[in-house]
Image (tube, rainbow, N blue to C red):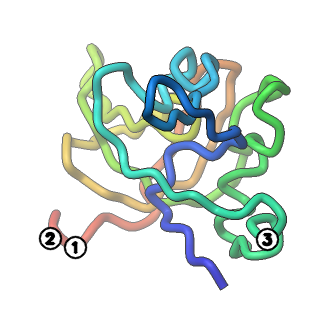
Amino acid sequence: MVEIPDSLRSLFSASLQQRDGTYVIEVPSDEIDQEAVTVDETYRVAVLDAASSAKAMTPQASQNAHTRQNATQPPSGPPVDDGEVRDVTIETVGDQGDGIAKVERGYVVIVPGGQPGDEPTVEIEQVQENVAFASVVDSDSRAL
C-alpha cells in the first residue's frame, strides 16, 4: 500500500506532456490560487499510476484529498468542521496576538496563545467561510 504523508499539500490528476525535449506536468491554476503551491518554489512530486492510486490511498490520505478528487471541480466550503480535532503548525502571530495556522487550500485556523513553530493538537470550535477558531487540546512536546 502506498503511504501518503500528512504533509501532503496538494493532490490532483494531470497528464504528462513532452515539450521541447523535456517532460511537463501542468499544475492547475487553482492550486496557485488556493496557495497550495507557490510559483518559483521547489516541491517533491510523487507520480502514481492513475488506475491504482485511488485504491492505494490510506484512509488518512483519502480524507486529506477528498476535495482534490477532481481538479476542475472547485472545493466546496471550508476544509474543517466544528468539533474536528487535528494537528496544526502555527506559522505566525496575528494582529491580536493569536497563533495562525494554515491547513488545506491555505484555509486559516486561529489558535489563541499559539506561537510560531508550535505544533499543537486543536479542536475546531467555530467555522466560518474564510477562517476557523480553535482551542488547544494538547500542546506539542517542544513547548514543555
Q: Amino acid at mark 2?
A: Leu
Find residue 141 and name its label: 1
Helix, strand or loop at mark 2: loop
- Binning the other alpha carbons within 10 Å of mark 2 as few (below 14), some (14 to 19) or many (20 upward) gives few
Direction bottom: furthest residue: 1
- Decide: few, some or many residues near mark 3? Use Cα within 10 Å; few <14, some 14-19, many ≥20: few
Judge left or right: residue 8 versus residue 28.
Answer: left
Mark nearer the N terminus (3 vs 2)? 3
**Where, by quadrant of the figure, is residue 2 drawn?**
bottom right
Q: Hey, what amino acid is under mark 3?
A: Ser
Please name the residue that numbered disc 3 is placed on. Answer: 52
What element does badge 1 sit on?
helix
Q: Answer yes or no: do the residues labelled 1 and 2 have beta carbons within 8 Å?
A: yes
Please give the label number shown on residue 144. Answer: 2
Residue situated in front as seen by the camera: 22 or 35: 22
Helix, strand or loop at disc 3? helix
Residue plotted at (31% across, 64% down):
139
Q: Is residue 81 left or right of residue 41?
A: right
Q: Amino acid at mark 1?
A: Ser
22 to 134, vertically: above or below: above
Question: Which image quadrant for residue 53?
Answer: bottom right
Crowd band around label 1 with a 10 angstrom C-alpha radius: few (<14), some (14–19), many (20+): few
